[in-house]
Image (cartoon, rainbow, N blue to C red):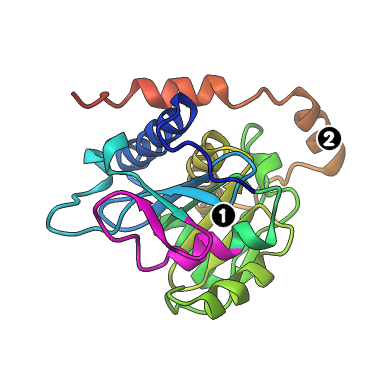
Amino acid sequence: MDRPDFASPEVRELRRRVALSCRILAQQGLADYLGHPSARIGNTSYVVVKPKFSTRIKGHGAMTAENMLIVDLDGHVYVGDDPPPSELSLHLEVYRARPDVGAIVHTHQLMATCFGVAGREILPILHLEATLVADGIAVYPSAKLITTPERGREMAQALGQHRLMHLQGHGIVTTGPRIEEATVAAIMLERLAQANYIAHALGTPRVIPPDELALLRADMQPPEGRWAYYSSLVEEPA
């Protein structure tokens, strides 16, 4: 497939949205200087991704469109002066294995990560968030960093066709067709994990049954409204 025009308005806008995802994740307390979102450029083999944290590249809350890298699925950097994240293979191997995935978020958000560590299921107990976990969450049973293509392929195989994954002792991965869905999924997953923790402390949670989940899925609104809300909470950098 031909290389896209990296200077096109569409690619510039995608870099802006990935940077916005970084700032939203920071504002929600889901990412500090670690973790990274990415998005595929259309149906191509090129990806926009947050660069590696360094003395020059600060935390998620400071990210701008100009900071965002463009790499190919072999990890070659085409746009950007900074190195990619050390776990770039986490993104690239999922994109290779899953043509349906257009965006990925990896964080170390605490509550959802702890559920993975404990091997506890995050149950569908809240109406807005329930459908997110209705098909379960994949598990990668290792805390090792996804720093090689081999580990990336191993992780992608464990992900299978799931949308979400626990990296046990490490963090979580959310996927979606766009960066909006992957980002909102990370927020909703943490909220649902917190609700599970509270509900279990109070008693036995009522799990939303399949017939209600089907109705909720039919009534579910697209993510634009939630994305607009979370975007309104962060400032656009000058």
Would you place residue 163 above or below residue 146 in this image?
above
Q: Name the secondary structure under disc 2.
A: helix
Q: Name the secondary structure under disc 1.
A: helix
Residue 138: where, in percent of width, then height? Answer: 66, 64
Quadrant of the drawing holding the C terminus: top left
Q: Residue at x 59, y 66 (%)?
A: 120
Horizontal placement of 102 versus 8: left or right?
Answer: right
Horizontal placement of 70 versus 156: left or right?
Answer: left
- Give the residue at mark 1: 200
Q: Nearer the viewer, residue 73 or 141?
A: 73
Residue 84: say if magenta.
yes
Q: Nearer the viewer, residue 155 or 133?
A: 155
Residue 129: say if magenta.
no
Q: Residue at x 40, y 32 (%)?
A: 7
Residue 45: where, in percent of width, then height? Answer: 58, 52
Which segment did they paint magenta?
Answer: 72-93
Amino acid type, label 2: Ala
Q: Is residue 115 visible?
A: no
Check the image and name the residue furthest to the left.
Answer: 55
Q: Residue at x 54, y 19 (%)?
A: 225
- Give the residue at mark 2: 214
Amino acid type, label 1: His
- Mark closer to the chain start, 1 or 2: 1
